[in-house]
Amino acid sequence: MKRREFCAGAAVALAGLSLAPWRKAHSASDVAIAGLDGRPQTVKSSEVEELRAGLRGELLVPGDADYDAARRLWNPAYNRKPALIVRCVGAADVMHAVSFASAHALLTAVHGGGHSLSGLSACDGGLMIDVSPMRAVAVDPLTRRARVESGALLGQLDRESQAFGLATTAGTVADTGVAGLTLGGGVGRIGRRFGLTCDNLISAELVTADGKWQRASAQENPDLFWALRGGGGNFGVVTCFDFQLHEVNPQMYGGEISFPMAGARELLRHFADYLASAPDELYVDVDLEGNDKLGRLLTFDVCYSGPVSDAPRVLAPLRKLGKPVKDDLAPTTYLKLQGSAYTPGVSKFGVYVRGGLIYGLTPALIDAVTGLVEAAPSNLLDVWMQQQGGVISRVAPTATAYWGRGASHNMGLAGAWPVGSPDAERNTEWVRHAWAQVEPLTRGNYVNIANTDDRESRVAAAYGDNYARLTTLKKRYDPANLFRLNANIKPAA
Ligand SMILES: Cc1cc2nc3c(=O)[nH]c(=O)nc-3n(C[C@H](O)[C@H](O)[C@H](O)COP(=O)(O)OP(=O)(O)OC[C@H]3O[C@@H](n4cnc5c(N)ncnc54)[C@H](O)[C@@H]3O)c2cc1C
C-alpha cells in the first residue's frame, strides 16, 4: 500500500452542534462538548481544570498554539475539531483521560500515529485522547523482544529492531502508527514469513473504558488479548505493546517494476500463476494506477527477503511477464524499502478508500479492476492488492480476532485529490461507483481499510465467526461503547 493513495468518508453526526461555541477550557467558562450520542452537553470549567491538573501532558483547546497540529490527521480529507485534546505522556494520563471521558459519556477519539484512512482518530466537538507523544521503542536483542509505546511509528520500530538484525512485521509506510496498524491486524513486507503484526504481539498494556490499567497476554486476560489482535480500537486505549522479533537480514532485494496497462489483463493472469508457487520470502503488492509521465500502469512493489543471491532467479519470471517501462528491482535494505514511501506528516492529497478481501486473482476480478482503471477519469485513482498468505494464512481464523486468514490479498480502491481541489467529489464518486462493481468479488474486509461509509454488516463480515465473541467481550470491557470511533463492534445485547 502506497503513500498518496487513500482515504474515506463521513463525518460524525453532531446534530445541531456548531463548532463556534467550543470555548477555551482555561477561561472560567464551562465547555460545550459532544456526548457519546453526538449531542452537545456542558462540562463545568472546574471539571475541565481538574482534568488538566491531573495530567503530566497537556490539555489543548481550540485557540491553543499546538491545537491545530495535534488534531491534524494524515488524511487531510478530514478536518475535525475536538473540543478537548489530551496529549498523554504516560499511562497515568491515559487513565485520567479515559476516566474523564467515561464519567461524562463523551464522544471520544483515540489517536496513535494519525494514519486512520477514515479520519476516526479525531472527532468534531468531542474529546481526543492522543498518545502520539508516547513514542519510546526499546529492543532487547537477547530476548528478541521490543517494548513499544503506542504513539510510536513503524519506522521507529523498524529502525531500532534492524540495528540488531531483527524485525517484526510492520506495514509498508514508515510513518504509519504502530497502534492502529497492530490492533487491526498489520500486513506488510515480511508478513508472509512472520504473520501479521498482531500475531507477533506478546502482550499489550491498555486502559479499558472503566479507566483501569490492564495487561493482556496469553496468561493475563487471555480473552482480551485475543480480542486486541484484530479487534481494532474497540477495547481500550493501548499504552504499550511487547512484540516478538525475528532475525531478519537487513540486506534484501526489491523495488518496483511497472508495465503499461495495455496487456495488463493477460499479464495479471500469468502473474496469478506465478504467485501460486511464491515462497514466503516473496511479497508483491499489485498497483493499478495512473502516472503523469508514463500513463496508466500496472506496478508490482516487490520485496524478496530470502538470500539476495537467489533473488534474480526467483524474480526472473516476474521480469519476463512483459516489457517493463520501469524496473528498479535491485539489492537494497529492508529499511530502505520500508522508508521508500516515507514523507512525514500530513498527506498532500485528500483520499477516499473502499476495500475488501480477495481470495485469488481470478479472471473475473482481473477483468473488473483493469477495466475500471483503464476507464478511470483521472490519474489520481487507483487499485491496490496487498499480498497476504504465507504464515498469515496458517494461523486458524479463530486463533485471534483477525478473521480473514485465507485471503490472498486485501484490495483497496482509492481516489485522491490535491487539498482544496474540486476533484474531491468526482474522485470519491468514482471510488463509490467502482466499489459497487467489485464488492461482489470480495469476501469480508480488513478493518484497517474500513471506512465510515461501511455499514455495520461490513464490520460483522470482517470478523466472520469471531464477531459474536467480540460483541460479548465488547459488552464486558466497554458496555457503553465509549470506544466507538472505529470499525465499531457493538456490545452484545
Ligand atoms: C499511507 C498509509 C499506508 C498504510 N499501509 C498499511 C500497510 O502496509 N499495512 C496495513 O496493515 N495497514 C496499512 N495502512 C492502514 C493502517 O493500518 C491504519 O490506517 C491504521 O489504523 C493506522 O494506525 P495509526 O495509529 O497511524 O492511526 P490513528 O489514526 O492514530 O488511529 C486509527 C485508529 O486506531 C485506533 N487506535 C489508535 N491508537 C490507539 C491506541 N493507542 N489504543 C487503542 N486504539 C488506538 C483508534 O480506533 C483509531 O481510530 C496504511 C494507512 C496509510 C494511511
Image (tube, grey):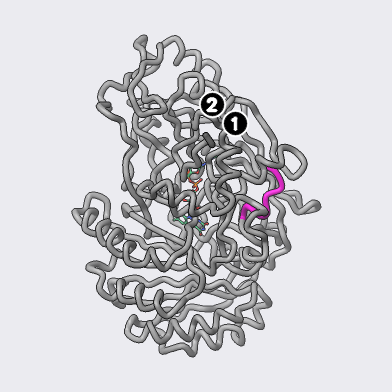
Q: Is residue 411 left or right of residue 378?
A: right
Q: Can residue 313 be seen in the rendering of this structure?
A: yes
Quarter holding residue 214 = top right
Find out whether the residues at labels 2 and 1 contact each other: C-beta distance under 8 Å. Answer: yes
User: What distance separates the C-alpha of mark 2 from that of mark 1?
Assistant: 8 Å
Residue 377: which numbered mark, if any? none
Residue found at the very far front of the displayed protein: 493
The residue pinned by badge 1 equals 208
Q: Earlier in the sequence, mark 2 or mark 1?
A: 2
> Picture coordinates of residue 474 (x, y %)?
56, 37
Say whether residue 35 is left or right of residue 16: right
Q: Residue furthest right?
A: 142
Residue at the disc numbered 2: 98
User: What amino acid type should be assigned to the residue bearing mark 1?
Assistant: Thr
Question: Residue 189 sits in which quadrant?
Answer: bottom right
Residue at 44% over, 52% down: 458
* Image depth: mark 2 or mark 1 in front: 1
Q: Which residues are magenta?
A: 197-203
Residue 165 vs residue 392, the one in the foreground: 392
